[in-house]
Amino acid sequence: MHLKTSSISERPDLSLSAHIDWYRVPLLRLLREAQSRAIQAGPRILATFLLPAADIDPLHVYAALEGTGQSPRFYWERPAEQAALVGGGAVTLIEANGTTNFTTVSNAWSEIMQDAVVGGAEETIRFDENGPICFAGFAFDPLAPRTPLWSGFPGGLLILPRLSLRKQANNAWLALNRMIAAGDDIEQCADDMLRDLLHLAVVSEQLAELPTKANIDGATSFHTEELCSASAWKEIVADAVNDIHRGDYKKVVLGRAVRITRTEGAFDVNAALQRLRESYPAAHIFALQRGERVFVGATPEPLVHVSDGQLLTTALAGTAPRGETEANDTRLGQELLNSAKNREEHAIVVETIRDALVGLCAGLEVAPEPHLLRLKNVQHLETPIRGQLLPELSILDTVACLHPTPAVGGFPVQTTLEKIRRDEQMDRGWWAGPVGWINANGNGEFAVALRSALVQGNQATLFAGCGIVADSEPESEYAESCAKLQVMLRGLDGSEG
């Protein structure tokens, strides 16, 4: 990767839309450098131009990108840490299917970055951390039968957007990306990129003046359909418990899906994202739109985070409801910590993650005891795990080794995957698969796509799952799955019931 800086002195402190023309000269310089490299190395070279955008709300950027007609669009936010990544369009889009998903995506990203030219309008920009950045997502099981439900969501997907925003606390940077060929009209390329930027800036500034949609959008009525009846799902759970008692496997995660249909108009995903970021600030809020479908969620389960080679992951398994009073909540949390069933389920996840990372990290550290992760409607057992990623590896290498964890699949992995394919009776698609981002240095962040829904117009398919072990009871597992479905029911509906 080739880094260049092109500073603009004495740029006026105006809104982004008011000083876009100030960026034309350094942008042209960058694009010509990329074209020069394309002539030498060919056939197409990535050019990434970065500029500051500290005052833009990431959700306004996501909404503004809808008006450009740029698809796909993606949204990624950790509200509690004031961290977000938003992008639209695709200068490169890699689709993969089959067991080589992670390798295909990783190799494609490495090839793109090999000769990329990155520059910007400010000398203070951290080019390595802020751009270029790709969004990536993967199906839970690339070998599972597919249905039309998940059309547009392949086994693996890598998206390098035309325009993206990365925000960290009070700092934010926009990235304009283009693949440049030897014969391109550079002046026209610059005009197109600045036109995208102007539209985004103007619409974002307009949205900032409007009331927050989530606060004015009331609850609405909808029809609910269980894709697998409650009685049938409980029978599947009971069969799994019998399998475990026979010694077929130690744990399996069984999912269920519910379809809701809005009686008046389409679901407003932008409003849902606003509700989710307000209600679940500690979660990873995400959305990916491809065509008419949007996969959206607020997952409490990080898969892995890598920054400057420092790896952080979390074992998350074992669930209890929240209490209606502080005393009741404390009692339920203590029961969860003391529960032999939940501690066994959690220990399996910790052991599997540790074993998967031993060959990828130096100095792996596992917390000696789990603690409680308290969310709005449920609480979980959580154990943090840290290590130093080996220098020749990227975050995608760790994702490939970690997924699927026993928290979303089971243990042993292959046996339980076969059980899920045979008996679960639904197409998981990207539910419980890894979603996240990777930057130029192979750092990034991925989460497990739980507490999520696939939305198309006035219909949404919601997903939830439960970890089944020897002591599991079908009735309590069904109740737990209903509690988990409430996250997206409230997010899409706008009610607090």
Image (tube, rainbow, N blue to C red):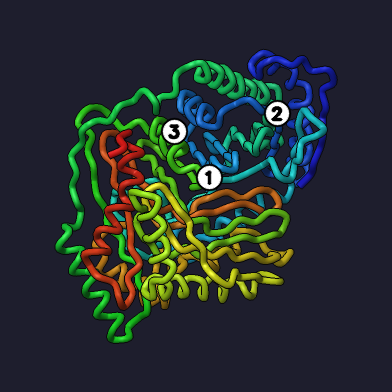
Is 124 drawn above or below residue 257 in the view shown? Answer: above
In the picture, the disc for residue 52 is 2
Residue under circle 3?
274
**Relative to the observer, which residue lies in front, 263 or 456?**
263
Is 92 drawn above or below residue 419 in the view shown? Answer: above
Task: Residue 362: name its quadrant.
Answer: bottom right
Q: Tell me what residue is drawn at x 17 percent, y 59 percent.
A: 230
**Relative to the observer, which residue lies in front, 493 or 358?**
493
In the picture, the disc for residue 93 is 1
Viewer can see residue 375: yes
- Going from N to C along the chain, the mark reached first, 3 or 1, is 1
- Going from N to C along the chain, the mark reached first, 1 or 2, is 2
Q: Position of residue 385 (x, y in %)?
A: 60, 66
Q: How many marks?
A: 3
Q: Is residue 79 left or right of residue 129?
A: left
> Looking at the picture, which amino acid does disc 1 mark?
Leu
Instruction: Give the alpha-carbon distance from disc 3 to disc 1, as whole Å.
Output: 27 Å
Q: Position of residue 427 (x, y in %)?
A: 30, 57
> Looking at the picture, which amino acid does disc 2 mark?
Pro
Q: Tell me what residue is drawn at x 68 percent, y 54 percent.
A: 307
